[in-house]
Structure formats: structure tokens, C-alpha cells
Amino acid sequence: MVNAAGKFGPYGGGDTRLLPGRGPTGAELVRSRVALRVRLRSVSPGDRLPDAGVLAEELGISEITVRRALEGMCQDGLLDRRRGRAGGTFVAADWDAVVAVTHDAEEAASLDSFHLLLECGLVARGAGEVPDGHLEGLRSLVTEMDLAEDPARLVELETRFHLDLAEGLGGAGVREFAADLLGRQCLLMPAPSPAVVRARNRCHADLLAELGRGAMDPAVRAVKEHQRARPS
């Protein structure tokens, strides 16, 4: 995943006041990005996380903030701290069960609405101005989702689609902003079912077709339909 946070600070200098309520604290940022790593399967339950210094550089926050955040996640049962030569900080083996306790439908709905607003704005601004080459990678993800059978792979691909869409329409800083929203949603709501992802993928395909034509209104409608997508 392209990560500009270490160079530009969180969100490439974007205004975090746009987030519902307030911008994330350093600890919340660490939590959301660890959750996003699990969703993207760059780490799995039982895997060792990168060292705190590496995470601090990636996120553009202090190492002590990262260490405190990881310790808090250990206390919450999301991570395990192991000592010794093979020690470090590991994703808890029962990650899914622990995350289920953190689900909050009301806050998840608020973030989902904000993410919808973000994508509608990006699409409205970018329609007719997106170089076709920027859409090819997104089209490949749509095709992969059509072919994927593994539920975890489907959810991973959909998450990557939205990250790449944010970057393609808004740049690396907007991708970082979207990454925090998506990571927080990973902690607040269950992963969508395969049937829901497949229904949403039809909206992905429609969105890319309309962006390719430079049709702003239909493209924005495709984004809105994505949020309402249900299995047929």
C-alpha cells in the first residue's frame, strides 16, 4: 500500500477536522492502521507486527505514541506482547472475536456516511479529468472480485479498490485519509458478506464506466448505489 504519511504527516496535511467529531488521536490512528493491515491481509492473526519505530515512520507520529498505542491494544486483547529473542508485538490469535466486541453500529454508520460524502466529492471533482490509465488498476480489481471465491480475499479486494480510488482521484494524501476511515470501520462493523461485496462490485464496474465516459451525475449515483447495494 502506498503510504505517504511518513513524508507528509497523517493525511498529507489534510484537515482532520473533516472527520466525524474530530480528527483521530495518535493512538486511534495506530489502531485503525493495524486493523487495516489485518483487513488487507498484510498481517494475519498470530503474525508479528513491524517494530514501533517502523510504524512511527510510516504514520508520521512519534515512536512513544506508537508504543503506548500498541500497549493499549495489548491490554484490550487485540495484540499480544511476547518477550525474548523471538519476541515482539503480535496480532492476537483471536483477533476476530476481540474485534467483534468493539463493534458500534451507530459510529460505523456515521463513518460510512462520511466515506460516502468523501467519495461523492472525489468523483464529482474527477469525472471527465481522470486519465484512463488511472482506471486500469481499478478495473483489474473489479475483475479479480468477480473471480474470487475466498470471502476474506473478496473483502480485501474491495478495501483495496476504495483505497486506490481515493488515490486515483485525490492523490496520496487522500488515500491516507481514506485509509484511516476504512481502518476505523474495520473495528466498528463486521466485514461484509461475499454476496454484499459482489453486489457492490457491480456498482464499482458502473462507477468506472461512467468515470471513463466523463459522466459526473451517473458516476455519483453509482457511488450512492454502492452504499445501498444488497444481494440480488
Image (cartoon, helix red, strand yellow):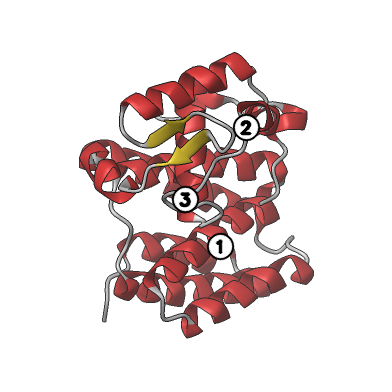
Identity, as a three-letter code, of the amino acid under mark 2? Asp
Q: Within 10 Å of the Cα at label 3, are there few (<14), some (14-19), or many (20+) other Cα atoms?
A: many
Foreground mark, 2 or 3?
2
Residue that label 3 marks: 38
Q: Residue at x 31, y 63 (%)?
A: 228
Q: Are marks 1 and 2 in contact (CB under 8 Å)?
A: no
Q: CA distance from mark 2 to mark 3?
A: 16 Å
Relative to 50, residue 130 above or below: below
Where disc 2 sits, the SS reads loop
Residue 98 on image: x %, y %: 27, 41
Foreground mark, 1 or 2?
2
What mark, if any, has residue 34 been given in the picture?
Answer: none
Question: Which quarter of the picture shows residue 136?
Answer: bottom right
Foreground mark, 1 or 3?
3
What mark, if any, has residue 51 been given in the picture?
Answer: 2
Relative to 193, residue 14 above or below: above
Q: CA distance from mark 1 to mark 2?
A: 28 Å
Q: Residue at x 51, y 56 (%)?
A: 40
Sequence-wise, the earlier of marks 1 and 3 is: 3
What mark, if any, has residue 161 been given in the picture?
Answer: 1
Identity, as a three-letter code, of the amino acid under mark 3? Val
Residue 11 on image: x %, y %: 63, 33
Q: Residue at x 27, y 76 (%)?
A: 231
